[in-house]
Image (cartoon, rainbow, N blue to C red):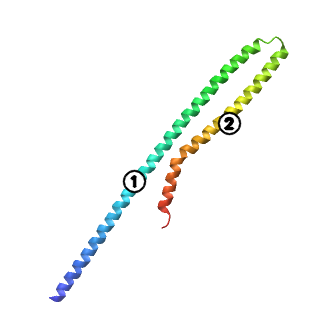
Amino acid sequence: MNAMSDTTAQFETFAAEAQAKMTESMEKMAKSFEDAAAFNQASLDAFMKSANIAMKSAEEISAESMAFSKKSMEEGVAATKDFAASKSVMELMEKQSDFAKTFFDGFMKQATKMNEMAMAASKDAMEPLAARVSAAAELVKPA
């Protein structure tokens, strides 16, 4: 009967070890699912933050563009009135030349400003996503 007791004891030990390993594996798997869910939630939050930054930046760029268009239109109307008040063709040509130079300089300044706004918007909108890419790289980095 001693052999039977030894076999029973061995089986009980095996069953207990198997159950302990199964419990450990299930706990690790549950933790992995929790970690994945947390990572995905953080990624979704970063995407939403990025989208909000991009939308706000687009609104600012659009408002800047509309303000410049309005200002340009007003300056064009004022210049046309000034052109009509010219006393000679020479005076008209001088006014038109001055207006063209002023308009071109203003346009170039505005183009530079719009470019800077767009670059800043892109940088700001990408920051949350870049942080998530770094976090993903850390996850797959060998230990």
* Residues at marks 1 and 2, CA–CA distance in whole angstroms: 41 Å
Q: How crowded is mark 1: few (under 14 residues within 10 Å), some or many (20 or more)?
A: few
Q: In this view, does 106 lie to the left or right of 125?
A: right
Q: Is residue 125 left or right of residue 35?
A: right
Q: Residue at x 73, y 30 (%)?
A: 105
Residue type at numbered disc 1: Ala
| Residue appearing at x 52%, y 37% in the figure | 55
Residue 65 in picture, x, y percent from top left:
61, 30
Residue holding disc 1 = 38
- Looking at the image, the residue that sits furthest to the right is 90
What number of labels is visible? 2
Q: Residue 91 appears in which quarter of the rendering? A: top right
Indicate left or right for 39 with 115 as reference. Answer: left
Measured along the vertical axis of the image, is residue 30 above or below residue 80? below
Neighbor class of circle 2 (other Cα within 10 Å; few <14, some 14-19, many 20+) is: few
Q: In which quarter of the image is the N terminus?
A: bottom left
Report the residue at 78% width, 23% height from top: 98
Name the residue beneath numbered marker 2: 112
The residue furthest bottom is 2
List x then y, in percent, for residue 68.
64, 27
Q: What element carries label 1?
A: helix
The reply to whether callout 1 and callout 2 are in contact (CB within 8 Å) is no
- Residue drawn at the location 39% of the way across and 57% of the way down: 35
Looking at the rendered structure, the kind of residue marked 2 is Thr
On the image, the x and y values in percent for residue 130 come to 53, 51
Which numbered dot is residue 87?
Answer: none
User: x and y percent of residue 57 in the render?
Assistant: 55, 37
